[in-house]
Amino acid sequence: MKAIIIDGSFGIDSLRIVNQDSAAPGPGQVRLRMKAQSLNYRDLLTVQGAYNPKQPLPLVPLSDGVGVVEAVGEGVTRAKVGDRVCPIFCQAWLDGPPDRDRLRSTLGGPLHGTLREEMVISEQALVHPPAHLSDAECAALPCAAVTAYTALFTEGDLQPGQTVLVLGTGGVSLFALLLAKARGARVIVTSSSDEKLSRARELGADEGINYRSDETWWNTVRKLTDGRGVDHVVEVGGAGTLEGSIRSTAIGGHIAVIGVLSGVKTSLAVTRILMGYLRLQGILVGHRASFEALCELLAAHELHPVISDTFPFTEARAALELMARGGHFGKIVLEVP
Amino acid sequence: MKAIIIDGSFGIDSLRIVNQDSAAPGPGQVRLRMKAQSLNYRDLLTVQGAYNPKQPLPLVPLSDGVGVVEAVGEGVTRAKVGDRVCPIFCQAWLDGPPDRDRLRSTLGGPLHGTLREEMVISEQALVHPPAHLSDAECAALPCAAVTAYTALFTEGDLQPGQTVLVLGTGGVSLFALLLAKARGARVIVTSSSDEKLSRARELGADEGINYRSDETWWNTVRKLTDGRGVDHVVEVGGAGTLEGSIRSTAIGGHIAVIGVLSGVKTSLAVTRILMGYLRLQGILVGHRASFEALCELLAAHELHPVISDTFPFTEARAALELMARGGHFGKIVLEVP
Amino acid sequence: MKAIIIDGSFGIDSLRIVNQDSAAPGPGQVRLRMKAQSLNYRDLLTVQGAYNPKQPLPLVPLSDGVGVVEAVGEGVTRAKVGDRVCPIFCQAWLDGPPDRDRLRSTLGGPLHGTLREEMVISEQALVHPPAHLSDAECAALPCAAVTAYTALFTEGDLQPGQTVLVLGTGGVSLFALLLAKARGARVIVTSSSDEKLSRARELGADEGINYRSDETWWNTVRKLTDGRGVDHVVEVGGAGTLEGSIRSTAIGGHIAVIGVLSGVKTSLAVTRILMGYLRLQGILVGHRASFEALCELLAAHELHPVISDTFPFTEARAALELMARGGHFGKIVLEVP
Amino acid sequence: MKAIIIDGSFGIDSLRIVNQDSAAPGPGQVRLRMKAQSLNYRDLLTVQGAYNPKQPLPLVPLSDGVGVVEAVGEGVTRAKVGDRVCPIFCQAWLDGPPDRDRLRSTLGGPLHGTLREEMVISEQALVHPPAHLSDAECAALPCAAVTAYTALFTEGDLQPGQTVLVLGTGGVSLFALLLAKARGARVIVTSSSDEKLSRARELGADEGINYRSDETWWNTVRKLTDGRGVDHVVEVGGAGTLEGSIRSTAIGGHIAVIGVLSGVKTSLAVTRILMGYLRLQGILVGHRASFEALCELLAAHELHPVISDTFPFTEARAALELMARGGHFGKIVLEVP
């Protein structure tokens, strides 16, 4: 079976298609025939060597995907041959609080990822995605959608009528928009592009702020909430936006700290956290129970992920280059023929 | 009746003893004859004009105290004449999440505080302290002890066997030490004084770290927890210690952001929050329901606050000067003759 | 102003229209000009003397209603003249767990109720209903809709994809159906009437069971859930249905024990509760915080209560007779001209 | 290695000591050398054929025990050779809500139990008991202590200052007494024996009621709580006591429905559940996470289980006969030489 690996050294040019032996699933394991994968920004950083420079190579990258069970090991009860399933991002994190072992059990580094025709995983480390989704849509879920669910529900306890500030229109942000609207929340989206704001509004966003033309966007957020601020922030910006997010948040509000797109170090006013009774919660995707709850929510409201572009499996390099250029809106998906 | 006010301009020298008319409690109100007050660092900042420079004067300072009900207004059912009660810090925050009105209803600024012989408050804005405590001990509770309770239990859900890092030996920190030990937790305390560490150990602390002689104290915290880090931090240091607190915290851990003793701006590595799945929770004392739960916990384990020094009510100035000099260990209390 | 009272002795024939003086709101109080009221089965029992035979008379009956604030007392901040508001069922239960005083503070007995042109209540004891509802629809909320919300969300934590069994098509049951569908749950409704089942399906019910033609309806519930049983039961039947509800419930499921329509004593198999890890939760309407959360949910999904019949305020007797006969589908409302 | 089985037909006389082959642990499994076991009433019922008459024979009975890991299969990380560990009661229930498969994975029927010199289990299905306990004390934990923990904490959220009613002095009840006192609660114990009440008081019980001499014991419970009733009931009596337990419970209180000692069918007043806003929660031991939390609580307060009698492993029959006669106070333990 074919796999794509980062070979020898980091960089998009180091990606190679190789042939690997097919493996038999051991006790409690299943073998999947992969149907589709999707990209996250973490995958681009990993290929570039920027996510974890100590990652041993070769490595099969990517954490997201969907496949069909084609063989099961002894004693397997959670899946049967023919089931369509998604591997979970942290293979060892099924429920409860995170710990070091759980957070290190991630696909696409340090563990080999989904960018191959077959993979063997524990029967515990999978979820059955909703039936109303296509393979490409299922492949979009494990990382970005679970992150959005964890931020808003598992950690955030989002309630109808609350207001959510979603930074940008990346994968996590668009899922957060869809899920928050399904729960009956009001959603404010920021972007540097009026066109992307317009597409976000078509997906249900109540307000859009172009942070390029509106440099003190947090003041606009305040105005849009009668001076009160928002209840939740899906903070994917990192150091460049955290201060603005803090200024946008209502007393007692919740900031899900997710991404580091705009840098890692920031100067922070501690008193604002204190005097605002704010909660900053670091989020690293989430556990299997959140993934399962996400699937119920998607099914109940018949929600569909936003897919931007689809490539054949063998053109993973082109897909990564598209992500590096930006300009996509929604998830970039690979399909295995 | 006598009251002490900040008169004309800020500064310890602006404190004046004045005579005020006795007020009749309106419907739903009670009048307290105050028995004792206690100081918090916030009170010193307020008197110095550093907490809120826009605070109108004159102001009766201090938020902590205990009194006896000597008159009740129409329709009062939560207290009767003769009851010993403590006013709550945020007079309008009884339960549930904080909001702007609740957080602005604080004694000792913007509302007149406890440094007087009599005060009239709503019957909703009081708590009955435990019977086993002296008046001086009761006066020590409303701010520091409720803050510690909120940090560890209301927000932190501290469990037996977990480890708590307590910064310093101020009022909140010593209460956190006592409460965490009562719940069966392990406690690590930091201080710049070996003598204070020794006294903290007498109160039950399992470990003490002198952060003056041990500049990378977070590494020592890590060593004391087998490399894992602590589950909770009672972070009263602010900008000067937050980075160290973050480095001290286990994956999935909780940092209660309480104080700003060491400055307000800090450079923060956002990725550590994210990769550690950390929670930073701003804490501003807490609601009446937490105060009531605190009283049950103190009573159940017969815990006593640590009282450092006691002054007569009329020597509030000397008490504040002692706080400004530092060197106390436990709460500074005023007693009304 | 006019009020309708139960005068002298119990019975529908004892209802009298009387003139009462208009009262000025005291400190912290508001006076409402009532626009509409609605009936609950409890009101019929109260008028008949069957709910609490020791209730002193005269009594203004009914607990549900909506009015407009026309005067406010000193210090009122939660409402202003012109606001449309609903009194809450338990006037003293704002949030947190119930206690004796909270559960005894109910309108329509022991406290005078809503069946009058004006009423004075505490500013704490009211909620602002959603703007998209008519007065008649607002009047339908305080008792039945809050009960359904408390059962499914405050106590039940209903999740998308779970299954809810709703007994009958009374006021609480129809609200439970609407709210559960909005949250993305699957709903099974029982009734003795095929026509009512058909109307329930129009409102979104996924399945209907006629318990008259299908005497062992719990077996049908089991079949409809692949033998698993339902996650939640809205149990309004009481003694006559509780055993069937228990047999209908999945392991770990939740039965909200609400009504006593079919009698009060039942023979119960304790082992089924134990071996099924079931939770039986008695529900008595709920607190103000649940009412507020309900309003957010109704507004977010633009839900409308089902109104069966509307009468003028002065024809309360005819309205109660309709309820006694049964045959209505949805709430019976009175309107004040 | 030796095992004791129920052979051919049910009954204490059907217990046989047999020799079985030693098994190698498969992937993810460990083999334990058992050090001690303990009895629960369920084991007596199982041996007598009264718990599940359809249970296939032969069966190794008993669910409680402790052993030392003497061999580990491939890929095991949760335990190593030499570790002292307890198998968990429901082998497949690690965390989260119960379901059918989880509740059917119980040792001592349908799965073979602990009454043998060696047993092979999944590395997931074990817990490390506290170091301060003897082997006999560890063997007492898996069923009774976890049940008490689940009732009071996992489901009950017991708080300091609340009151707990504990029925009788059996295994679950004595653990509930110890754990509730450690959390700072007040405990009322019932028994038919003044001597047992006296021993319960030595263990910390605040009040004792002899239900033989005090037939309406629920009235006494009410008197001891100023008419309010208790917050939690550890209800191990079943049909014979449930009505009394309901009458003993405060508004909003919680009844953990655990045992069926006094019969399975009872006549129940549904209105009391409703009007008291009571919660009846069926409890079937609990999950691994509760067991682990229990161990932390025992360690933090250095609590010791109450051991009544100890027998050699080979005298299991005499141990069961002692349980059948009653008269023990605390757990009956078997030790493997």
Image: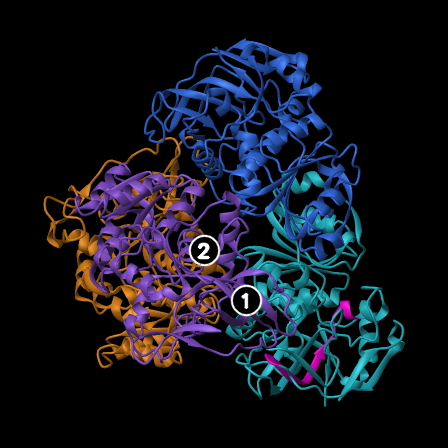
Chain colours: A orange, B purple, C cyan, D blue
The residue drawn where x is 17% and y is 56% is A317
C119, C299: nearer the viewer: C119
Q: Is residue C228 visible?
A: no
Quarter in which the N terminus of chain A is drawn: top left
C258, B64: nearer the viewer: B64
A328, B261: nearer the viewer: B261
Q: Is residue D34 visible?
A: yes
Q: Which segment is the magenta one?
A: C27-43
Picture disc at residue B136: 2
The residue drawn where x is 54% and y is 66% is C182
Residue B245's place in the image compared with D55, above or below, is below
Q: Chain of mark 1?
A: C
Type of residue at label 1?
Answer: Ala
Picture disc at residue C83: none
Q: Position of residue C6 (x, y in %)?
A: 84, 76
Numbered disc 2: secondary structure: helix
Numbered disc 1: secondary structure: helix
Type of residue at label 2?
Answer: Ala
Residue A218's place in the image compared with D318, above or below, is below
Label 1 neighbour load within 10 Å: few <14, some 14-19, many 20+: many
Residue C257's place in the image compared with D158, above or below, is below
